Amino acid sequence: MTMSVRVVLLILVCISIPVYDATAQRQSTSELLSLYLKERAFELAARDVMRRGGRVRPMPLARLRPRNDRIGQWMKVLYPESEPRIDTTSFIVESLQPIKRIRRPVHEALFTRTAWAFAGSQSRSPLDTLQTRDIRSRMQAHFGSPSRLVIDMDSVEALPAAEVIQFEYWFVVNDSIPVMVVDVNGPWDRGIIVAAPAALRSEIRSLKRALLDPVLRSSKRDPWADYYYNAVQRIWYITGYDGAMFFDKRIGRPDAGLGPPSILPFLENQ
């Protein structure tokens, strides 16, 4: 084989072998090595924590900017009193006539077709966070006994829990407006419900405060005793206030014909 032929063959062999890029190979290896070392460090740290029973220090919270303030909107719905609220109405109670229990049937017949609006206990005001039995003690001192009691209801034990009313105070406000103050959840709950004609829907919260704020500002409470039917437990209690403490006593089914219980036995125990 001549020299010229050998040179040509050597050139062809060199062309057929792929070129080795040392720089690219070193870069790829470095990346893999860095990834391996990082994962290896995490693995060793996790093993050490499991072996020693220690705790890994938490990473700081990432502060993300929300697209809109949904939490703020949700809080306003959940707690409407969380921000100062300006009343657009100011109801004035010029006269107030409590309806006694014996006169309730006559009074009820006068307003059988009344469409009612209600103000519940959704706010964080003192009236809506005070225990219901404390409100009852204050109303007892100002207005006497309620207009309607749980013992006055027919077939209480057969009713759904949502339909069992524990007590109601009925009033005639400003000579012509029927108003009810209702306990729907019993003495262990907080707040009460106020009902008035639907025409006063926009003023009912103002009416509620005008009617009951004087009761809350006074520290006067009177003793009382009443039946309480817990529709969830399906248990009857005698509950009340003896002038010093609130009390609850589990009992059997009371005799509705005998009326409400007397407070005297509980006063004698003081």
Image (spheres, rainbow, N blue to C red):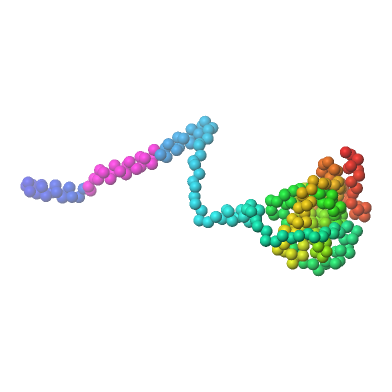
The segment highlighted magenta reads 18-37
Foreground pick, 237 / 118 = 118
* Place of residue 78 in the rendered image (x, y in percent of width and height, measured from the top left): 64, 54
Residue shown at 63% from the left, 56% from the top: 77
Q: Quadrant of the C terminus?
A: top right
The prevailing secondary structure element of the residues shown in magenta is: helix
**Quick check: can you spot residue 132?**
no
* Place of residue 81 in the rendered image (x, y in percent of width and height, measured from the top left): 66, 53
Foreground pick, 61 / 160 = 61
Residue shown at 76% from the left, 56% from the top: 210
**Quick check: can you spot residue 90?**
yes
Q: In the rendered structure, does residue 36 fall within the stretch colored magenta?
A: yes
Residue shown at 22% from the left, 47% from the top: 19
Residue shown at 42% from the left, 37% from the top: 40
* Place of residue 269 in the rendered image (x, y in percent of width and height, measured from the top left): 89, 39
**Numbered marks: total:** 0
* Place of residue 146 in the rendered image (x, y in percent of width and height, measured from the top left): 85, 54
